[in-house]
Image: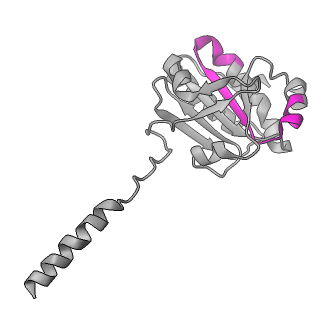
């Protein structure tokens, strides 16, 4: 009887070893490394988040062109303007069709802001969020410093992101709500 139990264990062992559990996907959260993320920008150029964070801090904004996100966009453009000179790189990812985004980008004067279009929403899967918009402030080197989710057309959320950006860069924060 012991031999048959031992034989059964040895026979089952290779099966268990052959089908290991896949490693858990690292959680996208404050204090954790940013996920591996590559996307094509509006001009078709490949943008690799790791390359961006090697240069400096990055603000990734997953958003759309709905009326709430549209009202909030002006505040995030102010964040980009205020901190770009200190090394901040902003990357906006819009969940909109390319055709709609071309006109939207022109209307909103996004010409000098790095942005991409992701109508399938794959970026939301990579960043493990369903909330639109969601903003990820990532330090140079790739550690997530802040996650700000939800739409706030009043500018309070953007102001909080601005404060965290100023602190990260070691500069006085800009009140983007007052500058609008």
x then y, percent, for residue 154: 77, 39
Q: Left or right: where does residue 32 sit relative to residue 179?
A: left
Residue 149 is covered by the magenta coloring = no
Give the residue at x 57% y 49%: 128
- Does residue 152 lie above or below 174 as drawn? below
In this view, which residue lies farthest toward the left? 2
In terms of image quadrants, where is residue 166? top right
x then y, percent, for residue 4: 14, 83
- Does residue 48 lie above or below 131 as drawn? above
x then y, percent, for residue 173: 60, 22
Q: Left or right: where does residue 105 sit relative to residue 141?
A: right
Q: Quadrant of the N terminus?
A: bottom left
Q: In which quarter of the image is the C terminus?
A: top right
Q: Left or right: where does residue 79 sit relative to residue 19?
A: right
x then y, percent, for residue 158: 68, 34
Give the residue at x 51% y 24%: 168
Give the residue at x 39% y 52%: 23
Residue 89 is covered by the magenta coloring = yes
Q: How is colour applied across the structure in the image?
A: one colour
In this view, which residue lies farthest toward the bottom? 1
What's the magenta region?
A: 81-102
- Does residue 140 lie above or below 150 as drawn? above
Q: Which of 17 and 96 is in front in this view?
A: 17
Give the residue at x 23% y 68%: 13
């Amino acid at each position: 009887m012991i031999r048959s139990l031992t034989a059964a264990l040895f026979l089952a062992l290779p099966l268990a070893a052959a089908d290991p559990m896949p490693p858990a996907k690292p959680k996208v959260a404050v204090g954790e490394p940013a996920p591996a993320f590559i996307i094509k920008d509006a001009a078709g150029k490949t943008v690799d988040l790791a390359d961006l964070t090697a240069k400096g801090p990055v603000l990734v904004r997953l958003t759309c062109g709905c009326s709430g996100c549209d009202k909030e966009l002006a505040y995030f453009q102010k964040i980009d303007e205020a901190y770009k000179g200190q090394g901040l790189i902003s990357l906006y990812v819009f969940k909109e069709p390319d055709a709609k985004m071309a006109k939207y980008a022109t209307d909103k004067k996004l010409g000098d802001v790095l942005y991409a279009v992701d109508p399938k929403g794959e970026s939301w899967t990579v960043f493990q969020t369903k909330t639109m918009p969601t903003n990820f402030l990532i330090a140079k080197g790739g550690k997530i410093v802040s996650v700000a989710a939800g739409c706030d057309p009043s500018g309070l959320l953007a102001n909080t992101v601005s404060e965290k950006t100023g602190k990260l860069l070691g500069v006085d924060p800009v009140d983007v709500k007052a500058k609008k």
